[in-house]
Amino acid sequence: MAAQLPLADLPLFPLNTVLYPGGQLHLRIFEPRYLDMVRECAGTGAPFGVCLILEGGEVGMPAQPAAVGTLARLTDFSHRQDGLLGIVAEGDSRFRVLRTRVRSDGLLRGAIELWPDETPHQVPVEFALLQTILERLIDTMGPHWRHAPRDAYDDAGWLGFRLAELLPLATEEQQQLLEMTDPLRRLAALRDILPRFQKA
């Protein structure tokens, strides 16, 4: 389990995206600091941390990361036709950044505190519409979830995280949903957002 790993000095990857537990992340890697990070993680099996960028950019000077992020574990990598390294990572536990430092090569590293996994909740009947909406979103936008087991849709945490990934939300909203610790509250927030996407 991730909670058993020493995470006093975790490499951090600030991005303009939010990674959720169980989610997939596809990246092209070209900066030397991140190539070194991928080699390190591939060699040791250790995760890296993905945090939303609050200030700065994905390239160049180290960006300011959000305080809450998600562990990412490499699941695949390949050399792309454009010469860049492509990686696939899967979201694991969430964490809070306690402090950060910048290594001499520009890689951001942080001491983190892992969050406990959410208590599983069955999806209440009042959120059944969200299950139907997720099925439609997966058909058109999330093909890698098409073979998810049927009972996954009954898990409030999984349902909320997948909707937060696939709905066209602002990154600030995605971050707020990541930081919620109650899966039923997250579903309620998503239900309240839905009218925005209904056609007039």
Image (spheres, grey):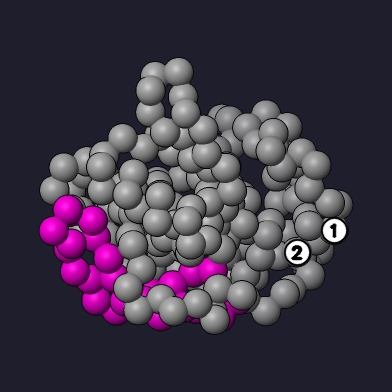
Residue displayed at 16% across by 42% down? 60
Q: Nearer the viewer, residue 193 or 163?
A: 163
Location of residue 196 with respect to 200 vertically, above or below: below
Residue displayed at 65% across by 36% down? 142
In which quadrant of the rendered view does residue 124 lie? Answer: bottom right
26 on left or right of 171: right
Q: Nearer the viewer, residue 52 or 100?
A: 100
Location of residue 121 with respect to 16 vertically, above or below: below
Q: Position of residue 135 (x, y in %)?
A: 75, 41
Residue range corresponding to the magenta coloring: 93-117
| Magenta portion: prevailing SS class | strand
Taking the magenta stretch, the answer to whether it contains residue 108 is: yes
State the mark number for residue 151: 1
Residue displayed at 57% across by 42% down? 76
Q: Nearer the viewer, residue 6 or 153?
A: 6
13 on left or right of 47: left
Amino acid type of the residue tagged 1 in the rendering: Asp
Q: Position of residue 20 (x, y in %)?
A: 53, 57
Q: Can residue 57 be seen in the rendering of this structure? A: yes
Disc count in the image? 2
- The residue that label 2 is drawn on is 155
